[in-house]
Image (cartoon, rainbow, N blue to C red):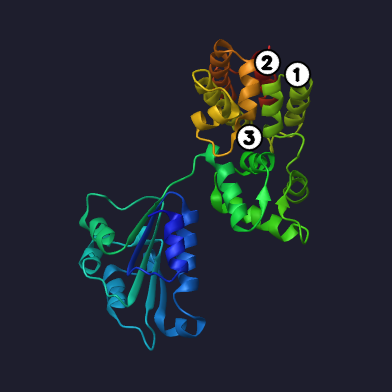
Amino acid sequence: MTFEQIKADITARKFSPLYLFMGDEPYFIDELTSLLIDTVLPEEEKDFNQTIRYGMETDVATVITLARSFPMMSDYQLVVIKEAQNLSKIDELEIYAKNPLKSTILVLNYKNGTLDKRKKLLAAIEKNGIVLESKKIPEYKIPAFITSYMQSKNLTIDQKSAQMLTDYLGNDLTKLTNEIAKLLIAIPQGQKQVTADLIEQNIGISKDFNNYELLKAVVEKNIFKVNQIADYFEKNPKNNPMIVTLVVLFNFFSNLMVCYWAKNKTEQGIAAELGFRNPYQAKDYIIALKNYNAFKCMEVLSLLRVYDGKCKGVDNVSASEGELLKELLYKMTH
């Protein structure tokens, strides 16, 4: 089941006796765990029927004993094991997972990895409960996540603003949603759109000098704007690390390479080829196809690999990131 499906079932009070949330992305694990804590029991029943333990502080025998006890004057009891990856001999939970108590909801919050898929415990939980493997979202999919997250808050966000947040915050969803929470507090009453101005005022990202605007200038071969942004990046290196800029450029030109072989080179055709939901997202690729032929695109991708090495010290003794970026951008756009 997906995160959205599990969330919908919990909200509808369709509970499972066993939940295993595991993986490398803690955001989804913590979101579903918190949702169960907020949903299963009313506040007046939590003192007697809710137990939250940490894997490091308990053992399997205790967890099984808690899970096999019955709720007091309630339909359910909730047992949550946070950081279950630290629970010693966790495989021994198999004996309970084979026959879980229907009145107990046992939640295993397992971070920074997954259960061994060869072990019987995972098979038992899959048979009698719900398993979510929470994977990191690749950075190129973060703007879509931001858009969807805003929609869940009854707000909209344009492509530029979503990309600004992605470039600045990366794919750390916990950090990202915390920063978005600040925006939600700051948004004027009645306003339904998160704008670049709002982000600039409250998070400190320049709406005019960022990787989104740099990419746009490169695509359009607007040399003046490219140099203007490169100068700004050189003067503000902490907020504009070169490695992030390289990732943004590489992702775009990798996608552009696919576009040359697309049968339908309209916005709709390119969007379908690249898996975009909104054809508007293909607009920059249509412009780039006119300004960069396939051979130049391959050259750009090669340059990006070379300068990725240079910014990490390969064949580079003293050039700063700002100097390297200016040199790279000149070669890309000429």
User: Regarding mark 2 in the picture, which secondary structure is present there?
Assistant: helix
* Above/below status of 41 relative to 21: below
Measured from the top left, where is residue 254 in percent x and y? 52, 24
Q: Is residue 329 left or right of residue 130?
A: right
Query: Which comes before the other along the chain, label 1 or label 2?
Result: 1
97 or 257: nearer the eye?
257
Mark 1, Cα crowd under 10 Å, few <14 / some 14-19 / many 20+, is some
Quarter in which the C terminus is drawn: top right
Q: CA distance from mark 2 to mark 3?
A: 24 Å
Residue appearing at x 62%, y 15% in the figure: 292
Q: Which residue is mark 1?
A: 223
| Quadrant of residue 76 within the rendered picture | bottom left
The answer to whether mark 1 and mark 2 are in CB contact below 8 A is yes
User: Regarding mark 1 in the picture, which secondary structure is present there?
Assistant: helix
Residue appearing at x 30%, y 75% in the figure: 67
Q: Which residue is mark 3?
A: 280
Query: Which comes before the other along the chain, label 2 or label 3?
Result: 3
* Above/below status of 315 relative to 114: above
Quarter in which the N terminus is drawn: bottom left
241 or 67: nearer the eye?
67
Query: Which comes before the other along the chain, label 1 or label 3?
Result: 1
Q: Which is more foreground, mark 2 or mark 3?
A: 3
Measured from the top left, where is residue 44 in percent x and y? 49, 85
9 or 125: nearer the eye?
9
User: Regarding mark 3 in the picture, which secondary structure is present there?
Assistant: helix
Q: Is residue 28 left or right of residue 228?
A: left
Q: Amino acid at mark 2?
A: Thr
Mark 3, Cα crowd under 10 Å, few <14 / some 14-19 / many 20+, is few
Q: Which residue is mark 2?
A: 333
Measured from the top left, where is residue 257 in percent x and y? 52, 20
Residue appearing at x 45%, y 69% in the figure: 12
Measured from the top left, where is residue 77 in percent x and y? 37, 78
